[in-house]
Amino acid sequence: MQETLDISSIMHDESRQGEAFTIKQVKSEKEGNRQFYIESYGCAMNFSDSEIIAAILIKEGFKATRHFMEADLILVNTCSIRENAEQRVRQRLTEFSKAKKQNPSAIIGVLGCMAERLKSKFLEEEKIVDIVLGPDAYRDLPVLVARAEDGQRSVNVLLSREETYADINPVRLNSNGITAFISIMRGCNNMCSFCVVPFTRGRERSRDPHSIVAEATDLFAKGYREVTLLGQNVDSYHWQPGWGGETYNFAKLLESVAKINPLLRVRFSTSHPKDITDEVLHTMAAHHNMCKHIHLPVQSGSSAVLKRMNRTYDREWYLERVETIRKLLPGCGITTDIITGFCGETDAEHSDTLSMMETVKYNMAYMFSYSERPGTPAAKNFKDDVPVALKAKRLSEIVDLQHQHQQELHSLEPGKVYEVLAEGISKRSKEHLFGRTSENKVIIFPRNEVQLGDYVYVQVKEFTSATLFGEIINLNSKSEINRQHK
């Protein structure tokens, strides 16, 4: 029977602490040729974390593979936000068991938020899992891999008040070489009643701004032309140096990254309605390369539901923020998250959400029916009493309305001209590229002589509810476009 080692307990046991950090890595027969496969689920933060994990493994001599059947180490970076994400992970573990049968020495690990929440179940029920590692313990992955190679199953889900991985240069997995994520903070201090993030990712802590600027500068030098600054709540970013010096809030950080080069676009996600400031909006307005798009989750249009959700703002506050955004940033794209069927939601409260959508007319929305997450305040304090069929009906109404709004908004686009960053080859044809406007609108256009990473001006000709189609106009040389940015 395999021993299960909980590194979390070793971390607090001085008599064994040295053992956990001085253990020599067991050398496999394929030393220097070991391959790892990593699969990510959930938010952009998880995908960013996977790039940190890849950097740690490559430093240990591993190489990445796109095929899990070839891998010596199979990792799944998980999400606990919604139940269906957890179900997908369990299904994938069943698939990964095939690799284990073919190669008994293969190591399988569950990482991230789901690992922290369900560590015991993974080790007790999923017999193929060798490693369970929380989002603040990725530096310990080589230690746990070594123990797994030695026949020990291990877990470390300790949360940290300091870890930001600021010194690790992420390996850009499956990168297009044009756009990249940069994590600026970790954890969350908002205790939204429906959310597991504060319990799976810990308390908020901001990363050193100088390391963020250095990472963005390095990416630009390597040919990247857009960075997205990531955090659970970017607007609460705050850096206070320990020995005096300059304090940074989010607006100052944005300005510092925007000033790296006018050809480097800057995006961010996610904003919290209670924290987004006019200072941030003025900073966005002041820099051409600050993308005019804000993801502003509303979750519900009902003040009563928002109170039960502990969102700490009401309907009026949210609408005031939207009004200010549109005043200071005309044409700014606004996208959102919506949860329907939250505990106790009435027909009238559902109607409030529909009316909020009618008022704002979001450019895009992520829409979900509520799924109870064990251990959250909502699970402890409220009854999940909206019937599944009613949740489905309300979600369908929300999705249909959002589709209608996107169709209406896109019907106004033909004839408009946008500056577009060419990001990739269109799925419809190798002769077409796709890119996004500053407002985060996706446009497909003929490739012509455009190279990925170029800025071009595209006039919209046709549309669907999801995508715009256009033609390049006055195809300027790259140097002419660059001068316009400056």
Image (cartoon, grey):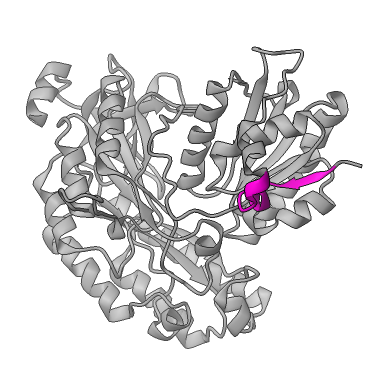
Residue sitting nearer the eye, 405 or 59: 59
Occupied quadrant, residue 233: bottom left
Residue at the location (21% across, 46% down)? 254
**Residue 230 on the magenta span:** no
Quadrant where the image shows the C terminus: top left
Which residues fall within the magenta stretch? 3-15
Task: Using residue 317 as the reference point, say whether residue 304 is left or right of it.
Answer: right
Task: Using residue 82 as the reference point, say whether residue 304 is left or right of it.
Answer: left
Occupied quadrant, residue 263: top left
Occupied quadrant, residue 260: top left
Quadrant where the image shows the N terminus: top right
Q: Is residue 289 visible?
A: no
Residue at the location (35% across, 32% down)? 179
**Residue 5 on the magenta span:** yes
Tell me residue 118's x, y (percent): 70, 57
Residue sitting nearer the eye, 195 or 422: 195
Tell me residue 217's x, y (percent): 25, 28
* In the image, residue 434 above or below residue 335: above
Task: Using residue 421 as the reference point, say whether residue 18 is left or right of it.
Answer: right
